Image (spheres, rainbow, N blue to C red):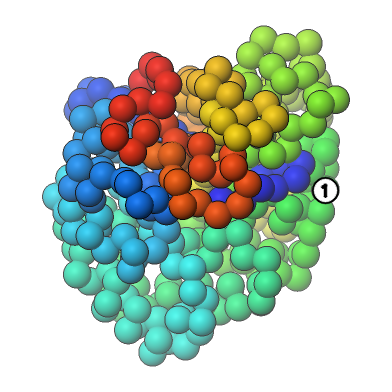
Amino acid sequence: MTGQGVASVLAVALFIGAFASIPTAVRSIGVCNGMKGNNLPSPAEVVQLYQSNGIAAMRIYSPVVGAATLRALAGTGIDVVLDEPGLDRLLTLDAASAWVQANITPYRGVNIKYIAVGNEVSVNTTKILPAMENLHKALSTAGFDKIKVSTAVKMDVLGTSSPPSGGKFRDPAVMGPIAKFLASNGSPLLANVYPYFAYTSNIDLNFALFQPTSATFQDSGHTYTNLFDAMVDAIYAALDKAGAPAVPVVVSESGWPSAGGEFASVSNAQKYNQGLIDHVGKGTPRRPGAVEAYIFAMFNENQKEGKETERHFGLFNPDKSPAYTIKF
């Protein structure tokens, strides 16, 4: 996750309670498991914390760094979004097949749902689609047809995002073919959506925090009561224009920092993440129905690069105590 201007794409969701008691529509919510800290719990403890809180989905940012966590996830039923950050590892079919054998085959007991080929790739973007195509073929050949291949984008993939109905990809030559690939294979577009990074002082803060607001607006027959919906629907509008209206958006990251910068506070983080948890089951004005989303992140990570806020997105502290109260 990196700081993004006026729109940064989706990712959210916690849902708690025993697995059997969680409504189907809500089982689409998970939490990203960042590992950039020298004081974090062991992989087994992390998985146990997910289970004890009823969090049924996890995003892992590397099969190498996350290998011990993948082993600990076996047999738990927790859904997994697994990233492969190295596009060059997938640029031939042989290389992609070797990657599957090394990073997927050993974890047949893990519910790997999506593989994100690159996260917020901003250079060499023409490599994304060939890597996705090779990985899709390699997974199919190895018998992992149910695993969907996608890529995770941030909001600057859009050249236009306001109003939501005007959403349009910045580089249609890159994103158009990717959107069509996703459509043809029944895969979602993963998007990291951060109202925190999109927020500016000329917007009502309540509009960004899922709070009652006077900033509600109308666009193309839809009513927008929060910034998250406006951002996600701008991506849906871009997919429509790219000829892929049936491709769903999965919010692969979303969250709000509790310290380290302007508007970053425990109160605001609690309001945003609680609001997100309570809201995602409703969908967006353009796409009613539950949104599959992942909150960033499980822990405050003391070795996260970037601004101080980057180290304060956690729902939990490294000692496993809650960073603030969340009603799951």
> Position of 202 compared to 259: left or right?
right
Residue shown at 70% from the left, 47% from the top? 4
Task: Out of 151 and 301, give the one closest to the viewer.
Answer: 301
Task: Estimate the x, y position of residue 110 in percent, counting from the top left.
Answer: 22, 56
Task: Estimate the x, y position of residue 221 in percent, counting from the top left.
Answer: 78, 24
Q: How many marks?
A: 1
Q: Which residue is mark 1?
A: 160
> Position of 3 compared to 183: left or right?
right
Residue shown at 66% from the left, 76% from the top? 124
Q: Quadrant of the C terminus?
A: top left
Task: Estimate the x, y position of residue 23 in percent, counting from the top left.
Answer: 31, 25
152 lies above or below 313: below
166 lies above or below 257: below
Q: Quadrant of residue 139?
A: bottom left
> Position of 180 compared to 278: left or right?
right
Mark 1 belongs to which amino acid? Thr
Q: Quadrant of residue 203?
A: top right
Residue shown at 74% from the left, 32% from the top? 199
74 lies above or below 142: above
Callout 1 crowding tier (Cα within 10 Å): few <14, some 14–19, many ≥20: some
For numbered disc 1, what is the local secondary structure? Answer: strand
Task: Estimate the x, y position of residue 175 in percent, counting from the top left.
Answer: 69, 64
259 lies above or below 197: above
Q: Quadrant of residue 254?
A: top right
Residue shown at 37% from the left, 33% from the top? 317
Q: Is residue 170 visible?
A: yes
Q: Is residue 289 visible?
A: no
Residue lying farthest to the right in this orientation: 202
